[in-house]
Amino acid sequence: MNISLTLTESQINTLLDSYRDAINLKELPYVKAQLILSDTVITIYTTNKVVFTGEGADYYAKSFTPSFIAHSGSDEVGTGDVFGPVVVAACYVDQSAYNKLKSYPIQDSKKMTDDLVRSVGPILISTIPYSLLVLDNEKYNEVQALNNLNAIKAKLHNQAYLHLAKKAKLTGLKVIDQFSPKTSYYNYLKDEKEVVKDLHFETKAESKYFAVACASVIARYAFLNALDALSKTFDMTIPKGASDKVDDFIRLFMTRHGNDALKKVAKCHFKNIQNALNAQHD
């Protein structure tokens, strides 16, 4: 990740004062100063051009740039729910789209009501380039037998970014709401034919990056729609989450539709499901 800016003398002095302990003492041609930080190198040229290089480039540059920088983001929902699919969305937001969307209450979808998600979701889908992957329960149960959840999520996020890159030129950061260390993430993808590199990994990214928040809402919107469809198919209102209420529903669902139907609606490795199945044999 590279961000190039031309700063004033005052801005450069502020930068040097803020990170004086990171100054590289080695003299470089045409370079006034260089700062070596943990995930970013900041090079200040004699022309007052300043180049921020590395995963944290956006973080360090944002104090000297407009309030919004075009970027991409991805997030997933459904991984903690016994019922319903795992959904991953990735989207790209530029300045024009941001100007259209900033007045809406877009944030981490976990902090939004279902009604608000259902209202805002279609607006996002019609405004920004996005990629959406819905791993239904039958397929999830099949792949989960061979992959742990983080491996599944890594493959979905990678595929979402591959699809998104075909819909938009992805400038700026490509942010992923971190669920696994970077090295582990790419290790999960070692056998994939194509892997999107240069991702920026950050925890709680849906609360820090607008595009990740948008991806969170799009994914949640798709998850709710999928749960509605399952509820209609089985003529039962299928609950979210993994609470005691869900435990009661599992038993009711098994009574009405049988054990085999669970793999069509539930993540069968969840303890809630396993406990209900084991209870039948006691």
Image (spheres, helix red, strand yellow):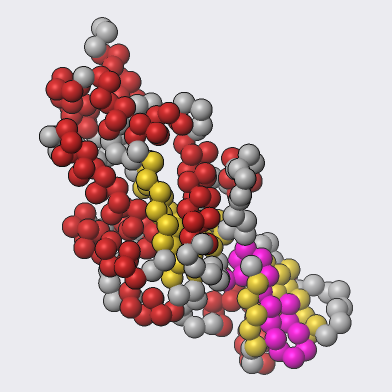
In the displayed image of the protein, which residue is found farthest to the top?
282
Q: Toward the viewer: 6 or 168?
A: 168
Identify the image quadrant of residue 95: bottom left
**Is residue 246 left or right of 50 when viewed as pictured?**
left
Give the mark count. 0
- Residue at the front extreme? 166
The residue under the point 77% across, 80% down is 33
Residue at the (64%, 41%) spot, across then down: 190
On the image, the x and y values in percent for residue 138 come to 35, 31
Q: Is residue 55 within the magenta segment?
A: yes
Image point (17%, 33%), residue name: 234
In what quadrant of the picture does the N terminus appear? bottom right
Residue 57, image x, y percentages: 62, 70
Residue stretch in magenta? 43-58
* Snapshot quadrant of residue 118: bottom left
- In the drawing, does residue 11 fall left or right of residue 70? right
Identify the residue at image location x=48%, y=46%: 156
Residue 195, magenta (yes or no): no
